[in-house]
């Protein structure tokens, strides 16, 4: 480690969440159906048939949760806006009651001194748009622009930082190719088209947001999964290069270089992204910041049968409850690589955190030392990157509350606040107090050892 021990004074300390994972109230105030409502209602798709119908009931309890954020000392809160609340049919009529909710949320955050960082799309596509073809069709990108116009007209007097999309890799590949996420389709060609239209709609939305306010700062959030070869062999190095291309370069290259990576384009043949003249210029319009979500890395080995590279499980490593390897150096490597190869003017870590199987002890407390260590080690990696000159401007912990973890339902707890789902009671975990003390100290480099709680 180098010697500097400070995050910049203006560094934003935050927490992140997404509409479908916390809000509940899926049928209130004119909200339309989303692909996640439909997916959850489809037998066998989500663990134990669970859904976001109630989730954390953030829709009604947000003042209580913002009070928790204030106790934490957060500078910023990343949430997402549910498209089906704003445009219930996907196109056409704007539901003012849906916008009213985000209006109240933004005001309450600002009243408590917390900067709102909305994400415009965190995977809850209106079901009528999926019925009309979903993200694989270009019209969905056009519909997204109409929705963003409605949101910007209402909120851009108070919101400056906007994230257009969350993890287009997951939205396209898990939604349209593997079928693990809504809408549950299994066509790689559809995933390729979906990914292109997500990126295109990002570019169009950025224009809308900048037109709506000269102060707008626009970014997109990618999940970065740095790829490492299982050995120094040429085959394993090529396997890692492929994994990096598929997850990371496929999105970074069009956003920062205006082209898709040639090696991965070749790999997808005969499928190709449905590029229309001018699309890549739209996608590559300069971003004010890049959001990155980091959870883990991938270690890849050449497939002896010549097929897709094989994911290797690392012996001796620790894993979270998601089965994801804990590898803080990967965050440092990803940040330095971004600076060296893509040079974004500003980066926010828009998600980082870990699921562990938390329990309330006989005193009702949650002693989540593993999560505390995970966060501390990853913050140390961010500090090293800042020391190395990478322009990281903020960190959003995933997540404030335990919440609906997509196809895993409520079985994976990522919160620094425990949610007792039967009663919806919020119980700050030890990591909550640790993060609070860390934010209060700010100038101190995070120590991977526990600090006194409560
Ligand atoms: C990310 C998602 C977020 C959450 C975390 C654990 O991929 O953006 O909604 O599910 O993983």
Image: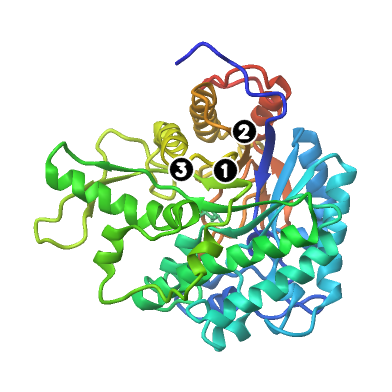
Q: Earlier in the sequence, mark 3 or mark 1?
A: 3
Residue 296 is left or right of residue 284, and the answer is left
Report x, y in % for residue 97: 86, 73
Q: Is residue 217 above or below residue 156?
A: above
Q: Is residue 305 above or below residue 235?
A: below
Query: For mark 3, what is the residue?
Result: 342
Kindly identify the residue that appears in the image at 51 percent across and 69 percent down. Answer: 279
Residue closest to the eye, 285 or 380:
285
* Image quadrant assignment for residue 332: top left
Query: For mark 2, what is the residue?
Result: 431
Label 3 or label 1, whichever lies nearer to me, is 3
Q: Give how far apart the Cα atoms at labels 2 and 3 are.
A: 34 Å
Report x, y in % for residue 266: 25, 65
Q: Is residue 244 above or below residue 55?
A: above
Residue 359's label in the rendered image is 1
Q: Earlier in the sequence, mark 2 or mark 3?
A: 3
Residue closest to the eye, 408 or 138:
138
Instruction: Give the farthest residue toward the bottom.
Output: 132
Report x, y in % for residue 442: 68, 22
Asked which secondary structure carries label 1, the reply is loop
* Image quadrant assignment for residue 56: bottom right
Residue closest to the eye, 85 or 289:
289
Kindly identify the residue that appears in the image at 57 percent across and 21 percent down. Answer: 446
Q: Give how far apart the Cα atoms at labels 3 and 1 are.
A: 42 Å
**Label 1 neighbourhood size at 10 Å, few (<14), some (14-19), many (20+)?**
some
Q: Earlier in the sequence, mark 2 or mark 1?
A: 1
């Amino acid at each position: 480690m180098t010697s500097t021990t400070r995050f910049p004074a203006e560094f934003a300390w935050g927490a992140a969440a997404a509409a479908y994972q916390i809000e509940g109230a899926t049928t209130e105030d004119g909200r339309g159906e989303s692909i996640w409502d439909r997916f959850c209602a489809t037998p066998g798709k989500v663990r134990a048939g669970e859904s976001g119908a109630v989730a954390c009931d953030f829709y009604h309890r947000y003042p209580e949760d913002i009070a928790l954020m204030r106790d934490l000392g957060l500078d910023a809160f990343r949430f997402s806006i549910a498209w089906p609340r704003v445009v219930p049919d996907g196109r056409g009529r704007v539901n003012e009651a849906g916008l009213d909710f985000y209006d109240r949320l933004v005001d309450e955050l600002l009243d408590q001194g917390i900067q709102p960082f909305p994400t415009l799309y965190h995977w809850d596509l209106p079901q009528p748009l999926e019925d009309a073809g979903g993200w694989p069709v270009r019209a969905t990108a056009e519909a997204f622009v109409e929705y963003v116009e409605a949101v910007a007209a209402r909120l851009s007097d108070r919101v400056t930082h906007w994230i257009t999309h969350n993890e287009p890799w997951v939205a396209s590949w898990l939604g349209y190719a593997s079928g693990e996420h809504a809408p549950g389709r299994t066509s790689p060609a559809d995933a390729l088209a979906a990914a292109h239209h997500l990126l295109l709609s990002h570019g169009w939305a950025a224009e809308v947001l900048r037109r709506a306010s000269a102060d707008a700062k626009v970014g997109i959030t990618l999940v970065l999964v740095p790829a490492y070869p299982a050995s120094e062999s040429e085959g394993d190095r090529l396997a890692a290069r492929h994994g990096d291309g598929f997850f990371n370069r496929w999105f970074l290259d069009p956003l920062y270089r205006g082209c898709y990576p040639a090696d991965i384009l070749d790999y997808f043949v005969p499928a190709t992204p449905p590029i229309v003249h001018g699309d890549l210029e739209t996608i590559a319009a300069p971003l004010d910041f890049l959001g990155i979500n980091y959870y883990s890395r991938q270690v890849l080995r050449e497939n002896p049968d010549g097929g897709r590279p094989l994911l290797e499980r690392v012996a001796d490593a620790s894993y979270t409850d998601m089965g994801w390897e804990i590898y803080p150096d990967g965050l440092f490597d990803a940040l330095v690589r971004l600076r060296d190869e893509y040079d974004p003017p500003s980066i926010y870590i828009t998600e980082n955190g870990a699921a562990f199987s938390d329990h309330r002890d006989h005193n009702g407390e949650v002693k989540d030392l593993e999560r505390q260590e995970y966060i501390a080690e990853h913050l140390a990696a961010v500090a090293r990157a800042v020391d190395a000159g990478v322009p990281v401007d903020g960190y959003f912990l995933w997540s404030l509350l335990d919440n609906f973890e997509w196809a895993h339902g409520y079985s994976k707890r990522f919160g620094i606040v425990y949610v007792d789902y039967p009663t919806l009671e919020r119980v700050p975990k030890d990591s909550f107090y640790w993060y609070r003390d860390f934010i209060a100290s700010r100038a101190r480099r995070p120590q991977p050892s526990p600090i006194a709680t409560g």
